[in-house]
Amino acid sequence: PPEHRRRGFGRQMMQGLLKELHTRKTPVSLLFPFSVAWYRSLGYGLANFSWHIEQPMRLLPDFPERLHVRRATVDDEAAMRACHERARLDPANNGWLTRTEAEWTKRAFKPENERALFEADGQVEGYLLYRLDWDAVEVIEWVATSERAWRGLLAFISAQGEQARQLKANLPQQSPVLWTLREPYDRTEEVVDFIFRRGALLVNGFMLRVVHLQEALRQRRYPADVVSDLVLQIEDNQLPANSQPLRLAVENGRATVTAAADQHNKHEVLKGTSVARAIRTDMATFSELYAGVLTTRQARVAGRLDGDDDACRSLTAVLAAAPFHMWPPDWF
């Protein structure tokens, strides 16, 4: 009710939830915020920037792989789910969620979503969920486990040019769509500045919070070729247990996490870098680093992180990851 607003009830609820999740050793929490600033004050960080594109269909390319795309039916649902699971486990598709039966049937496969799939050599290598009207082809989900499947599905979208005026999609930052366009902008639109035109709109979406720091570090996947040894000092006002200095050693894609010091002498451990290189930051900033959306250099320049050049380079290598992205069926 309106009379209960700005009395701290929401903050108390979130603080209680975070404590409960920490007790359960939940590694991270994801949410879509009503206010970035409000959730940042609780230790959440931005985890996602995506490209929202609205481009004329006439700019889209054609590829011969389009001939392997056909309409999907209910008989293809099992193969499409299996394809999604293979794609979800690809490190390039960071942020994809597992789905329950209800999420598949009520969100992904709901009747208004058209379906097309790419099939070659007896294998479903990709599929498209979309909506089509006279204004646009709106992409709901674009899954590809091979490069040829990705090209085939883009060409399938392009082939709808007689039925729709433009393509609308919320795409991951690493999507090559803009690099396939004949021109990366619509010449009928005004310039934004000088000769610069809008190719896409950069939008931010969900937020992530590291809840149980040790579990989040242990369970995360790391680049296999990175070897690193760091001390992390993460200030967490909501969950003080996370503020204990931790030693993070990474090798062969796995992390060993141990306490760097007792809480009472943590400052002695962090005075020098003889034990390990040290990084100091707050939980909201670390959550953005953990998600791969923020670099250590950006955080340090912005005054949100302390650490020498070696420590920053090391943590950047450790946390290297594809940008987070979710397709609309996973929005919650």
Image (spheres, rainbow, N blue to C red):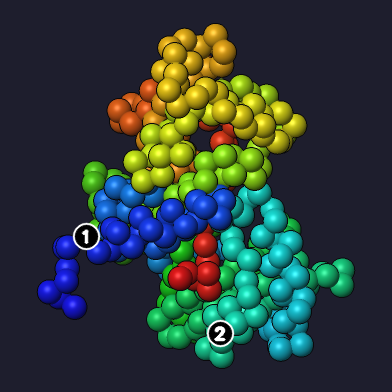
Q: Mark 1 against mark 2, which lies toward the viewer?
A: 1
Determine which of the numbered discs, if any, sits on residue 8 in the image. 1
Check disc 1 and give the amino acid type: Gly
Q: How far apart are marks 1 and 2 (CA)?
A: 35 Å
Q: Mark 1 Cα within 10 Å, few/some/many (few <14, many 20+)?
A: few
**Res 320 → quadrant:** top right
Q: In this view, does 261 lie to the left or right of 236?
A: right
Q: Position of residue 107 (x, y in %)?
A: 54, 80
Residue 299 or residue 270, whichever sits in front? 270
Q: Do the residues labelled 1 and 2 touch (CB within 8 Å)?
A: no
**Res 14 → quadrant:** bottom left
- Residue 326's place in the image compared with 38, above or below, is below
Q: Which of marks 1 and 2 is nearer the N terminus?
A: 1
Residue position marked by numbered label 2 in the rendering: 106
Q: Does the rendering let one see residue 272?
A: yes
Q: Is mark 1 on a helix, strand or loop?
A: loop
Q: Position of residue 22 (x, y in %)?
A: 50, 51
- Write the residue at 37% across / 28% down: 305
Residue 308 or residue 17, whichever sits in front? 17
- Write the residue at 39% across / 49% down: 44
Q: In this view, does 141 lie to the left or right of 183?
A: right
Q: Quadrant where the C terminus lies?
A: bottom left
- Write the residue at 63% across / 75% down: 100
Q: Position of residue 117 (x, y in %)?
A: 70, 75
Q: What element carries label 2?
A: helix
